[in-house]
Image: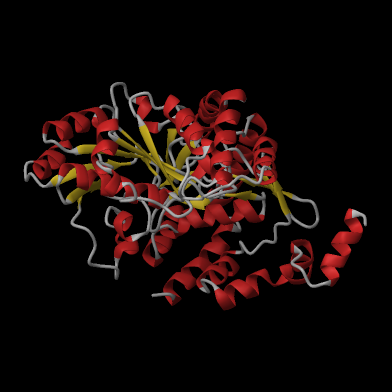
Amino acid sequence: MTTAESASESSQAGEFDLGTLLAERGAERYELHARYLNHQLPRMLHTIGFDKVYERAEGAYFYDADGRDYMDMLAGFGVMGLGRHHPVIRKALHDVLDAQLADLTRFDCQPLPGLLAERLLAHSPHLDRVFFGNSGTEAVEGALKFARFVTGRPRVLYCAHAFHGLTTGSLSVNGESAFRDGFAPLLPDTAVPLGDLDALERELRKGDVAALIVEPIQGKGVLEAPPGYLLAAQELLHRHKALLIADEVQTGLGRTGDFYGYQHEDGVEPDLVCVAKALSGGYVPVGATLGKEWIFKKVYSSMDRVLVHSASFGSNAQAMAAGLAVLSVMENEQIVANVRATGERLRSRLAALTDRYEMLADVRGRGLMIGIEFGRPKSLKLRSRWTMLQAARKGLFAQMVVVPLLQRHRILTQVSGDHMEVIKLIPPLIIGEREVDRFVDAFTAVMDDAHNGGLVWDFGKTLVKQAVANR
């Protein structure tokens, strides 16, 4: 019997066939989501015109049924660091499935986790050991547990506007009240302003602080820690017997033009580092908590404590294979160097537009993590329109830019946070000059329209009505 005949018989026998299922039910995607999942997501997508149907994806692009390309400047919130369906990662996953490994026996030591830890630690020379979980928030949860255990202290400090995840522990160090509201009581944690060393020291003097967790560049608003802050904070923390945790879930693996975001500042050596997102290759969720030898030795202090912190799917073969392939691609294709060069080209070209557009207030960031901030215009006509939007809801102007970028120019971006007039660009790290040219040309066209009172403002009126209706 041929393979085709076998497949045909299996299909007739009622066995699962993914292609058939998608062909029969794929058109119901928005209806299914509205009925069975988060019903507000399709509602939101319909409202802003983001309810597209993408048929396939490759590299930095999506494609619809008519073959039109859509440029991805969001990378799945950073998960698709190497773009979509990179051939090296796909091959690694095919290989690991075909190998039929004896995975997750729980009572052996498979080679892939050790090999990935070895490769990851090679980029983290002051760190010694790795715990593999399944996501960024889980990596943060592990770091919080480890820090509290080894210091014997309950409180973790975090920075205002931080985002470290949405599970209960990571939510306790989330700097946005909109995420925290209604989920109390949380862990005994305290916010300090990013860059404020005096505020940090005041909290440390209380003697109950286990650690400070910080993003080298905050995802919400693309706000960078001031020069010298991380090193000074590290010294303060260690003086008070507390730890520095670097959340590199979004900034790590080349995003900022170094392997880690903290590496832009000499001498910074966090005690614990959290990574995830891009390590997955966009396929298999994986998170990692990296730490110093003494921390892991104290947490796992005896055989009785061998499973004191574990994850059922942690270190699974598919995730480890994806992670190994990602690091191989990063090295072989010189991804970090590309991020440095392409990021500088994109940021400098956008920054040059601040003198041209009065509503373009700032362009900031590192590598391919760029924030475009809008601000109150000077001219009376534009100022009255700006004020109308702000009165309805802060952040609507940024949304007014994001929507035509997709609708007219087929470029997917995002507003950087709730009630923020900031667009965040975190494209796949593989983009180059062609994508920079396309984005800058499209952004210029949208800003021209906004400053000339064009169709962008008609959509702004729709957003205002929607904002008022949701109050």
Q: Is residue 442 above or below residue 365?
A: below
The quadrant in which residue 471 appears is bottom left
Residue 376 visible? no
How many marks on residues? 0
Left or right: where 268 falls relative to 359: left
Is residue 138 positioned above or below 5 on the image?
above
Q: Name the residue located 72 percent from the left edge and 67 percent from the top edge.
A: 26
Q: Position of residue 324 (x, y in %)?
A: 56, 34
**x then y, percent, for residue 78:** 51, 45
In front here: 316 or 384? 316
Residue 290, quarter of picture: top left
Q: Nearer the viewer, residue 105 or 205?
A: 105
Q: Nearer the viewer, residue 355 or 268?
A: 268
Q: Is residue 300 visible to us here?
A: yes
Spot the residue most to the left.
Answer: 206
Quarter holding the N terminus is: bottom right
Q: Residue at x 60, y 30 (%)?
A: 329
87 to the left or right of 460: right
Task: Give the side of residue 359 with respect to residue 345, left or right.
Answer: left
Where on the picture, by quarter, is residue 322? top right
Front residue of 1 and 363 = 1
| Left or right side of 444 for 224 | left
> How is this picture coloured?
secondary structure
* Image position, residue 82 (x, y; %): 60, 38
Relative to 462, say whether 77 is above or below.
Answer: above
Q: How far across and how far down the image is residue 406, in percent?
A: 63, 53
* Residue ranking furthest to the top: 266
Question: Going 64% across and 34% down the picture, which residue do you hit?
Answer: 437
